[in-house]
Amino acid sequence: MSELYTASGSKVHAHKADIFCRDETRVDWHSKALWALREKRDRAAGSLPEWEQLRLLGSQLKLHTLSHLAQYLEQFEQQCLSNGIKVHWANDAQQHNEIVHGILAKHKVKKLVKSKSMLTEECHMNPYLERHGIEVVDTDLGERIIQLANMPPSHIVVPAIHMKKEEVGELFHQQLGTKAGESDPLYLTRAARAHLREKFLTADAAMTGVNMAIADQGAIVVCTNEGNADMGANLPKLQLHSMGIDKVVPNMDSVGVLLRTLARNATGQPITTYSSFYRGPQEGGEMHVIIVDNGRTEMMKDKILAESLKCIRCGGCLNTCPVYRRSGGYSYNYTIPGPIGIAVGAKHDDTNSIPWACTLCGSCTYVCPTMVPLDKIIAHHRRLKADAKRLPYGKGGYMPLVGRFMASETLMNTSMSAARLALRVLPGSLLKPFSGAWGKYRELPVAPESSFASWYNKNRSR
Amino acid sequence: MKIALFIPCLVNQMMPEVAIATLTLLEKLGHEVIFPAGQTCCGQPMTNSGCFDEAKNTTLKLLNAFKGVDCDAIVCPAASCLVAAKENFHEFDGSQEAQEVISKLYELTEFLHDIAPIKTFSRPVAAKISMQMSCHGIRMLNLATPTEQMGKQRFNKVEAVLGNIAGLEIVYPARIDECCGFGGTFAVDEGAVSAKMGKDKAQAHAATGAKYVVGFDPSCLLHLDGMIRRQKLPIATRHIAQIINDAL
Ligand code: SF4
């Protein structure tokens, strides 16, 4: 499977998905594990009579904030400063990494504990800091697992979902010295806890992502299930928090709305086990917030793409996506996979294929707690790619032909009667090689003798 | 009512029995049915791929086939094509005439539920059927409440239309409205994933013990039929028009 574990690369989605699909038992298991989350989500969402109202409110408050972004970010910065928090601004990933390194270098940090941040993944921060001699330890269990396995996350909420417990057992045996052949989740979790505790106690600084940044409070919210963000932020004196500009919300009321949907939509929990609010440095410590753009302002210029910034990273759209569940997180050529990964990652995909890794079924759009119109955004990306003449799968070549073919009755009628005749008289085995992916996996259609149009002309025409 | 049929290319060329059933059932219900000439395709294969320039002529050809046609409604037995036609007409032609055509467009189930409900069925259809709740019909055309959506006001127009047929038992597959994996060119671009989705869906339908998979979207049915026969599953596909026609 090693071929799959490259986060970037030049392979089209279909190719990577094809490799993933070769192990059907794994596909079934992966699909089932994620569907179980979708079912839990349905139960949790269904238990709130006001669920659809919350989605609408969530969508409206995010749209409102995005359309007054400068104002809220400034307010947030002001409030942070008066709470004694240091605020930094980064235009792109490079600047973000430099700022983080600058702070850590100033404090001579050798070891950083980190939790819950897709943004630092987006910025490829870990390898950057490691190149500068700083050890970065991911403290989330799932994140730690993939870090030990030297892989990127395959899901935004359950990053090691693609690994079976036996594989985690083997990994821990090799890396942490647990018993060989042991795959009991409780045993493995305990072993990881003990290993991480030592890291927490010896860390010089802690870093987390940000779920929400509250403008009128100058405070941030971090949601975790393991309490590791708190362990990290409360032990060393130096704490850092990275956030995208899209994370800001106006006030506590907005937090109330989003917190009610976030965990329910992610895992079916009423709320994450720990929803921690940080509103200033600890005694004698320092708290830094790094606010990152990295292409988000650019995205806001396009009205349709802008709506992807409403996302609160619950992962619900990944869990429901029938394509993601059957092609795995590493097939998307971007740090964030699934529907939202296509929405925010399509422009980074050098194969131009991920906008087509979707049937446009629309399930994601209906699942989303902030009503990100994912299917519309994905379809829009296809159009942007087509307009830029960057079509995958040979579409650039054959689409004009299809266009001409479909627009002509004569062309369509003559060739389709030929095709129908071929389907009826030639043995299937002879046709299969000519029918591409369709015939490889399915029986070819049973062809009728004539079209409806000719039937109509014979039977109804007056 | 006077009804103009919109028969998408796939149905016209590959599944004429669906169009014949649609025509016959509408006639049995007392409607006058016409089939305007010059229809090919709604342009969906192209617009779905992002290729709007390539879709333009095709879409406008279909739109022209309906412009100025004297009728009360334009009815189509294919949900996905209907949705695409509506959107594409709107995209390429902003005229009043185009708007008139758009406002008359109905998918067959939608028409039989919202516009001209069937009063009585005259023949029983003794069969257990497993409904294929295709994506575009439920999520873009509101034929039924999708499972992702919460709240009390749930509806299912397909079941409402078929519900009064004597002898008919309606069941649903597991993961009731998960996509079957056809998705237009997705079926060829993403062969492996599309096939796996289709296989899972076909098996879920067969597991209900139903005699037929019944749906309102011919393209999904064509894909499922190919998957069912490849796996030799004991179930067959039928379009909703065929079931209704049998019951009238
Ligand atoms: S797009 Fe919506 S469903 Fe997907 S991760 Fe973001 S908030 Fe969740």
Image (cartoon, coloured by chain):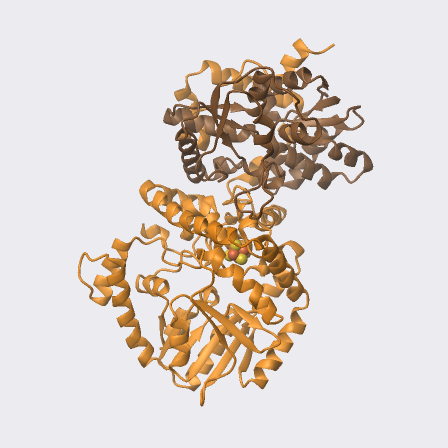
Chain colours: A orange, B brown
Question: Residue B49, how many percent across, how many down?
Answer: 58, 41
- Judge whether residue A401 can be spotted in this image: no
Question: Residue B6, how many percent across, how many down?
Answer: 67, 25
Q: Return the residue nearer the eye: A403 or A134.
A: A134
Q: Is B141 left or right of B74, judged from the image as shown?
A: left
Looking at the image, residue A176 lies above or below residue A376: below
Q: Residue at x 55, y 80 (%)?
A: A87
Q: Residue at x 65, y 41 (%)?
A: B52
Question: Residue A294, how many percent across, how many down?
Answer: 55, 67
Looking at the image, residue B196 lies above or below residue A377: above
Q: Is A51 left or right of B29, judged from the image as shown?
A: left
- Quarter that holds the C terminus of chain A: top right
Looking at the image, residue A21 lies above or below residue A438: below
Question: Residue A146, how many percent across, how many down?
Answer: 34, 61
Q: Return the residue nearer the eye: B21 or A422.
A: B21
Q: Is A386 left or right of A265, judged from the image as shown?
A: right
- Please identify the quarter of the rendering in which residue B248 is found: top right
How many numbered badges does the structure rendering display? Answer: 0
Taking the view exactly as shown, the residue that stands out farthest to the left is: A180
Q: Return the residue nearer the eye: B156 or B188.
A: B156
Q: Residue at x 51, y 32 (%)?
A: B132
- Judge whether residue B196 can be spotted in this image: yes
